[in-house]
Amino acid sequence: MPKRTDIEKILLVGSGPIVIGQAAEFDYSGTQACRVLMEEGYTVVLVNSNPATIMTDPEVATTTYIEPLLPGTLARVIEKERPDALLPTLGGQTALNLAKALHENGTLAKYGVELIGADYDAIDRAEDRDRFRATMAEAGLRTPESVIATNLDDAHRAARELGLPMIIRPAFTLGGTGGGVVTRAQDIDTMVSRGLEASPIHQVLLEQSVLGWGEFELEVMRDHTDNVVIVCSIENLDPMGVHTGDSVCVAPQQTLTDKLYQQLRDQAITVIRAVGVETGGSNVQFAVNPATEEIMVIEMNPRVSRSSALASKATGFPIAKIAARLAVGYTLQEIPNDITRATPASFEPAIDYCVVKWPRFAFEKFPGAESGLTTHMKSVGEAMSIGRTFKQAFAKALRSRELDTTTVSPAGEDELLALVAAPGPERFDHLLEALRRGTPIDTVHARTSIDPWFLRELAELVESAGADSIANSPGGEFTGERTFKSVDTCAAEFAASTPYYYSSYERAGASTSEIERGEKRSVVILGSGPNRIGQGIEFDYCCVHAAETVRAQGRDAVMINCNPETVSTDYDTSDRLYFEPLTLEHVLAVCEAENATAPLEGVIVQFGGQTPLKLAAGLHEAGIPILGTGIEAIDLAEDRGRFGALLHELGYQAPPYATARSAQEAMARAPEVGFPLLVRPSYVLGGRAMEIVYSLDGLQDYLDRVGARDGREIFLDLFLEDSIEVDVDALCDADKNVWIAGIMQHVEEAGIHSGDSACVLPPHSLGEDMLQQIRQQTIGIAQALGVVGLLNVQFAIHGQGGLHVIEANPRASRTVPFVSKAIGLPLAKLACRIMLGERLDELNLPADTTNGHVCVKEVVLPFDRFAGADSLLGPEMRSTGEVMGIAHDFPTAFAKAQAAAGLRLPTEGTVFLTVTDGDKQGATLIATTLHDLGFKIIATRGTAQSLRRSGIPAQPINKIGEGSPHVVDYIERGEVALVINTPVGTGARADGYEIRAAAIAHRIPCITTMAGGVAAARAIAVAAREGPPDVLSLQELYAH
Amino acid sequence: MSDATAYVLLEDGARFDGLACGADELAVGEIVFTTSMSGYQEAMSDPSYAGQLITFTYPQIGNYGVCEEAMESDRIHARAAIMRAAVDREDAPSAEGGWLSWLRDCGVPAITDLDTRALVRHIRDAGAMRGGVFPARVSEAQARQLIAAEPAMTGRDLAIDVTPKAVLTLAGAGDGPTVAMIDTGVKLSIIANLRARGATVELHPCTASPDELLAGDPDAIFLANGPGDPAALDYIVATVRELVGTKPVYGICLGHQLLCRAVGLETYKLPFGHHGANHPVKDLTTGRTEITSQNHGFAVLGPGGAKTIDSDEPVRWETDFGAAELTHINLYDRTVEGLTLRDVPGATVQYHPEAGPGPHDSLYLFDRFIADIVQSAGADCVGESPRGRFAGGGAHA
Ligand SMILES: Nc1ncnc2c1ncn2[C@@H]1O[C@H](COP(=O)(O)OP(=O)(O)O)[C@@H](O)[C@H]1O
Ligand SMILES: Nc1ncnc2c1ncn2[C@@H]1O[C@H](COP(=O)(O)OP(=O)(O)O)[C@@H](O)[C@H]1O
Ligand SMILES: [Mg+2]
Ligand SMILES: [Mg+2]
């Protein structure tokens, strides 16, 4: 049956900001879906709050709304756009939950919007753990014994029935939020409460444990004529108990016999039919006991998922693209397989290689947080590698992780085995070490339940590597010749026409490279590797734009990346995709292969964040041309001393600083710089371990904790307290013409990492003089560095002292997509054209990019995932993603951004304030506004007194130390709608910790800066006056 | 590379080095590849692979060892295994032995660490051909001679090598119909599927005469899978020709080709055959696509002698026994995958509904088959109804 003609306009919902459990994979799937639907001639209306996505590029959909993903907003979009259908299966759990809400509140029925892809009932059957369990039982499939609990009494009864350990699985959550394993009776209350709290329907499934069983996933696709195919099987090396998102995984499955695998396949098909997902992709998870061959169904996700992105990249079968076509009526047989072009999509890919996926963690950013891996997901990204054998793929995956830290295994055998036994972020590193030391496979298996097949492979890998670490020297497994092979969906049974390659080692002789390229010059674009905090989807966005530009400029775009979640690793994005680790060795090998039959023009290192930048010098030395900003300029900007000298020469101010090479020297030099001090070690990347200290004692304490490493530098900067931070993105061409794309004013003061603070474009409170100075200094720096392409400069405006330069990054910054969306000009593309040789005046850029609307970027923070870590913001970045609010005025844009970030500012209720003395005056301002709007104000004693002096009736309440009922009690009883808590110095920091933790646990907006508080108050006032803000599409905005 | 201890040589001179890992022997025959990612033991013990050397495109082979339960016959029939990363492990709870140990014990040579993808791409482009696996000590000149001495697959009767010497009757689980099978090398999964549905199966040597086949008054004749070229089995074709119209006749794989030849259709050799577990086959009577297990080097020509059929319609064409209706088509290369005889009871499929290894999507064919036999056993076997529906779906039932 061909596509449906009874629908014309389709609403697609994205997944919003990148959070743990829901990341770039939904940009990949959503972008594919939009493109397919547009190609099919439908009108596509897209809503997504995340500007750092390709899907929200204005050409990807017909109409694009960067608006909060909330039922109310969606209803307004539906009212305005009147779509015929809503496709909710490509935007993760967020889109699914929204579709469900819109069905339940009658919006869909009211406007006659049909759910396509999965209907309400199917979503509910899959997502409601109780209904799912019943559905499985009806279909004759087993699930672990379980009890549904909605309160603690249920939980205790369940514990008696099921025994401990018992698994908590909240309903309708994502990435296992709120889930866990209860092993001790005394933990039942806290852990179950957390689970109930996390579930939007206040329901958890308490389940019999199958810890230690094998965990398998199957990606299933079904069309509306009931044809079903399994795209890929995935086996977790970590047995049941570690979330699949945190597990090291391999595709296809390795350890099941054909008989057992076919049973899983049959069951997966039964599941998709029983749940009733009529069209599209689903993910079914199984637990398998290898000894008894028992199989249990763990869950099914009735939508594309992280695993489906992985399966797509692992096989070349584009699940999201096909799911979108199926949703509009095609059958699998009617859809061609892109890769062979000769065969239809109604088949199951045959793989002739192994794929390993490795999670990327960020525990080092959250001191205090438990770093054990459990049933709720904690990883922030992933790397995938392809090799001809499991060992090759595994060793490549190790290298793809790009860790900033090295694992140090304890010398004692018992300690080492304890680390091997307890799942944690470094478990496999310890495991390899244990194998290296000769620990028997049986011992490791007994302690981990990891299938012996994997352990033997790893033992062989360790042995072949000899004394070298596997990650550094690939060892015996890799002897032979490097050859490039294709991912072709069919194990070479048919010729492939889509160039998607990986390198592998084969015995010298017969192997020939499969790379097919024409005569065009190629440009290699280096991606940004696994997502991590500080380097996320923003950089992938830039890389994709680079590829599009390179192609448009008549060259072959060649992408190298190892992140399976992304659009950049979609084989449609570039002319040739190399799925490889971003190491110098692998990149040089690709360059050599690309240069073999036709010229390689050069490599672009500006778009993938720090990852490619680190390779620039090595590439340069190897004689590979770096396009755009050269390595000299990169070094000049990155070297503290050289950059400081350059600023000095230009006559620009920078915070006074000193460097020290020992703790002693740091203590000696600190007074020269003055306090407060911003301290950071040079050897830790990404703003890590950056702290503000207020005294020599504080510095000593820091040095004791973080430690000074011999010979490595420690930077001491004067911390510019109470400064306004400003971010600028600019373009500079080879003739030193500079164009300022956007100036962003941060909402939070300097000291909160630029990646963690909200910002406004255009600046809402800077005078023209200041703006002019900022422009001039940006131009000066760009010219002095010799930037060709993008430049990002961060400034701090410090009271009397004025403008200070904090740093300059001669590459695309995290803000490029935000600025591009705000000004309606694709910065990365423009930069790429400059790097390929064009001059600014050829690009027809407007002198002034402001355009009558205000854009606010807000960030989302993962504190709810890291119980134990303080949620206080600081100079070290910890956010995982961002959202954008667009409106005609600042307060509205700010409110939209807050709402999009999941912090809905209240319109009524009680506000709790507790601020430092320095902030008491500011607090009065905020409190006055809120009081006038009818809010009740409660405050800690000091703050309350100061408010009352200004005539605001604030009710004093106890600090925690002062006894119950104290502030946390209020929060826990749900009596607080907004928390404003500014901590400064070490004392208040410790005190506010519990308050912030309680606010996060109860999902109450908690603002920790005065500037943020003021903005929030203004936003609340505007919302109260004007009601819910209008929804605005990018296309409308740019039309002006 | 210098450490190579064995190599694969093809008749066109292409050579691929690797490490010897099975019995210290050489093997010569037709080199084919299978894209199935699991079920290596099933493949090696499948009689249809007699005379062939199997290249496994999936690199990791041997992962879960071997066990009695996975056997598709009583021994290994393939002549050698060609692999990228074979292992000999017994850790899997179901393993009764290691894969490579088993190959060695059975005297079957094997080679690993060989660039199987390069080999497969070569065969894909040049077609399946003769070749061998040779220990390094065998000179290339010697190897060439051995390959040249090996008869080509076309025109080859291999069924005679794998068929049983005497009739064997296996009772079913219940009192279902009796099926007389011409055993050209039947897979145990086929027998198991029939017996599980209550059928009693009589396995006959492939040289059995029509009278011998009918001696036990079976309810249907079943033509098994098996190795070799159907065109070389005229004696079986002649036997089947006599049976068509007297009893319902069903066939799988080689059996499909034999029944087709018996009613006057032609077979031909595919460039490199279908061997794998992922081919989509469309049931034209229901419109459903099944993911199928495939293992054949020859195929049946469609209407007008065409190798492929463009339409998705259940086209009909004339045979010596009336009309044949296309029921199944391969969506990869649009070759014939199954047909039903409209005027006499009989139906066949080219692929393997019994799986072993592979997906279970087509197991339902056995249900239909048994139901049909039971029905025709009750009815008069002449005239329009009931039809052999084994492959024909329920559309006209
Ligand atoms: N009964 C159980 N016993 C042991 N581990 C379990 C059980 N149920 C789930 N898990 C583990 O918890 C993880 C998360 O559970 P799941 O229901 O898949 O959550 P999510 O919806 O976040 O994917 C699984 O990947 C699995 O490792
Ligand atoms: N001297 C300073 N005074 C005040 N804040 C500073 C100073 N230096 C850095 N910061 C703050 O620390 C954050 C991180 O510093 P930055 O040098 O930009 O590190 P990164 O390389 O991680 O971006 C900045 O965004 C800013 O908020
Ligand atoms: Mg899950
Ligand atoms: Mg910075």
Image (cartoon, rainbow, N blue to C red):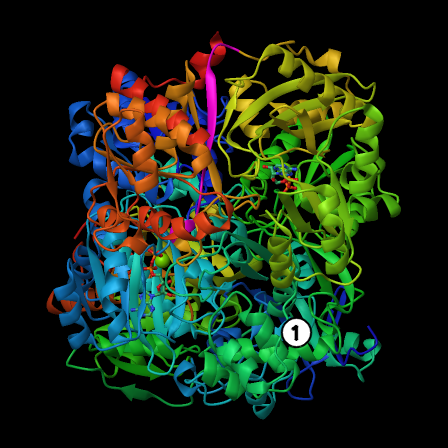
Q: Quadrant of residue A634?
A: top right
Q: How many marks?
A: 1
* Residue A55 x %, y %: 48, 31
Q: Quadrant of residue B113?
A: bottom right
Mark 1 sits near ligand 1, with its Cβ under 8 Å away: no
Above or below: residue A795 compared with residue A294: above
In this orientation, which residue lies closer to the viewer: A371 or B283? A371
Q: Which residues are magenta?
A: A851-864
Secondary structure at badge 1 equals loop
Asked if the stretch drawn in magenta spans residue B122, the answer is no
Q: Quadrant of residue A113?
A: top left
Q: Is residue A669 left or right of residue A608?
A: right
* Residue A154 x %, y %: 13, 65
* Residue B179 x %, y %: 26, 76
Identified at 60% across, 21% down, the residue is A743
Residue A836 seen by the camera = no
Q: How many residues crowd around disc 1 within 10 Å: few (fewer than 14), some, or many (20 or more)?
A: some
* Residue A289 x %, y %: 35, 77
Q: Where in the image, quadrant-wise, is ligand 3 located?
A: bottom left
Q: Is residue B321 left or right of residue A394?
A: left
Above or below: residue A437 compared with residue B48: below
In this orientation, which residue lies closer to the viewer: A136 or B192? A136
Disc 1 chain ID: B
In this orientation, which residue lies closer to the viewer: A866 or A379? A866
Q: Residue furthest bottom?
A: B105
In this orientation, which residue lies closer to the viewer: B338 or A196? A196
**Quadrant showing the N terminus of chain A:** top left
Q: Amino acid at mark 1?
A: Pro
**Which residue, given by chain and number where applicable, does mark 1 sit on?**
B151
Identified at 63% across, 34% down, the residue is A813
